[in-house]
């Protein structure tokens, strides 16, 4: 089984409360994520112990420039993000590099599977 892992501890509470419905990853990640895939949603730093939060299905995978992200995309990533500018500040803090509205991202929508 594949994992959809979140490095930042900021995501933990959003995932536990089920407020996070998608993830926006820098670049074209269609080779990694496919609609219908079953994944473990996990939290943990790279090369460290991870915590499984829930099992999910990937519902939708979209590739687009940051400038074309919708309100639904932004709110699914983080309910506190209200604009593309807010998102740019947010994603630059995660990737620790300059990112522009023309950069490509992959939006991966997922939903919990209740066992």
Image (cartoon, grey):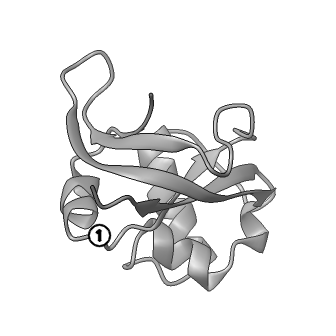
Q: Position of residue 81 (x, y in %)?
A: 45, 77
From what the image shows, is residue 90 above or below residue 71?
above
Residue wearing tag 1? 18
Give residue 37's quadrant in the image.
Answer: top right
Q: Secondary structure at mark 1?
A: loop
Residue pushed farthest front? 115
Q: Position of residue 109 (x, y in %)?
A: 56, 62
From what the image shows, is residue 40 above or below residue 58?
above
Side of 28 relative to 97 (left or right): right
Tell me what residue is drawn at x 65 percent, y 32 percent: 32
Tell me what residue is drawn at x 74 percent, y 40 percent: 30
Side of 106 relative to 63 (left or right): left
Label 1 neighbour load within 10 Å: few <14, some 14-19, many 20+: few
Number of marks drawn: 1
From what the image shows, is residue 45 above or below residue 37?
above
Q: Position of residue 94 (x, y in %)?
A: 43, 45
Between 57 and 45, the one lying in front of the other is 57
Between 10 and 96, the one lying in front of the other is 10
* The N terminus, quarter of image: top left
């Amino acid at each position: 089984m594949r994992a959809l892992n979140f490095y930042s501890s900021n995501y933990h509470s959003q995932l536990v409360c089920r407020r996070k419905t998608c993830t926006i990853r820098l670049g074209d990640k269609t080779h990694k994520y496919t609609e219908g895939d079953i994944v473990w949603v996990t939290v943990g730093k790279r090369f460290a112990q991870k915590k499984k939060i829930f099992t999910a299905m990937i519902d939708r995978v979209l590739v687009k420039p940051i400038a074309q992200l919708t309100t639904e995309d932004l709110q699914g990533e983080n309910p506190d993000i209200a604009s593309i500018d807010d998102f740019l500040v947010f994603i630059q803090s995660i990737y620790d590099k300059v990112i522009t509205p023309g950069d490509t991202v992959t939006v991966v929508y997922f939903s919990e599977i209740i066992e």
